Image (tube, grey):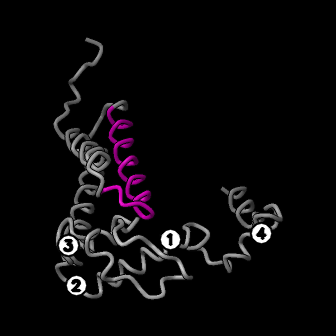
Amino acid sequence: MGLLIVLTLLAPFLIPASVKEWARQVDYNPLRLLCNDDRIAAYRNSLNMIRAHPVIGVGTGAFMKSYKYYKEFPEYRGVITPGEMKAHNNFLHMAAEVGLLGLGIFLWLLYRLFREADRVYRALSDNYLKVAALSCAVCLVSFLVNGLTESSLFYSRVAILFWYVAGLLLAFRNTHSSWNFSQ
């Protein structure tokens, strides 16, 4: 653990000069280091949509059609985003479509899901099942972290994986320690 802290503190001095120059070009803005200007513009435009309709949003599935009406002029750092696009952030996209009320309900659902995942993990006695349940929970967390820079819950082919893994995780509640997988 100590080595990790030391490496983290030394990292700014060990990175190549080209990376340092690039960081200077983006004004050392951590958000610009993680995302490009197009996404930051989309985030800002999404926030405009949320400000205009904070409680119930613009409507389910209406983000892309409504996006052009909430664009800043000029957009962030002169970027020009298309008239129809996704927010590139699950949480901003959801808040814009179903409002802060809908986002709050989704966050409550996630809280309940992970609280139940913890209960399931602690109740399992079989080590294989514990690892499988923990893997499902970590998979969901990684999906949500990815959702900070992508609207993955709004692509049906990708979102189904999230809900499938959530269901699989909850299905571990129905397992019994008496199961024997070798039979």
- Assign a secondary structure to mark 4: helix
**Magenta stretch bounds:** 129-153
Q: CA distance from mark 3 to mark 2?
A: 9 Å
Please report contact status of discs 3 and 2: CB closer than 8 Å, yes or no: no
Q: Nearer the viewer, residue 112 or 19?
A: 19
Residue type at numbered disc 2: His
Q: Is residue 78 left or right of residue 97?
A: right
Dot 3: few (<14), some (14–19), or many (≥20) neighbours within 10 Å?
Answer: many
**Which of the 4 image quarters holds residue 84?**
bottom left
**Residue furthest toward the top?**
183
> Measured from the top left, where is residue 153 in percent x and y?
30, 56
Residue type at numbered disc 4: Lys
Q: CA distance from mark 3 to mark 1?
A: 23 Å
Residue type at numbered disc 1: Asp
> Measured from the top left, where is residue 40 in percent x and y?
49, 75
Q: Residue at x 38, y 82 (%)?
A: 71
Residue 139 part of the magenta-drawn span: yes
Determine the main secondary structure of the stretch shown in magenta.
helix
Residue 118 part of the magenta-drawn span: no
First-in-chain label (3 vs 1): 1
- Assign a secondary structure to mark 3: helix
Residue type at numbered disc 3: Val
First-in-chain label (4 vs 3): 4
Please report contact status of discs 4 and 2: CB closer than 8 Å, yes or no: no
Dot 1: few (<14), some (14–19), or many (≥20) neighbours within 10 Å?
Answer: some
- Assign a secondary structure to mark 2: loop
Residue under circle 2? Answer: 53
First-in-chain label (3 vs 2): 2
Residue under circle 1? Answer: 38
Residue under circle 4? Answer: 20
Label 3 or label 1, whichever lies nearer to me, is 1
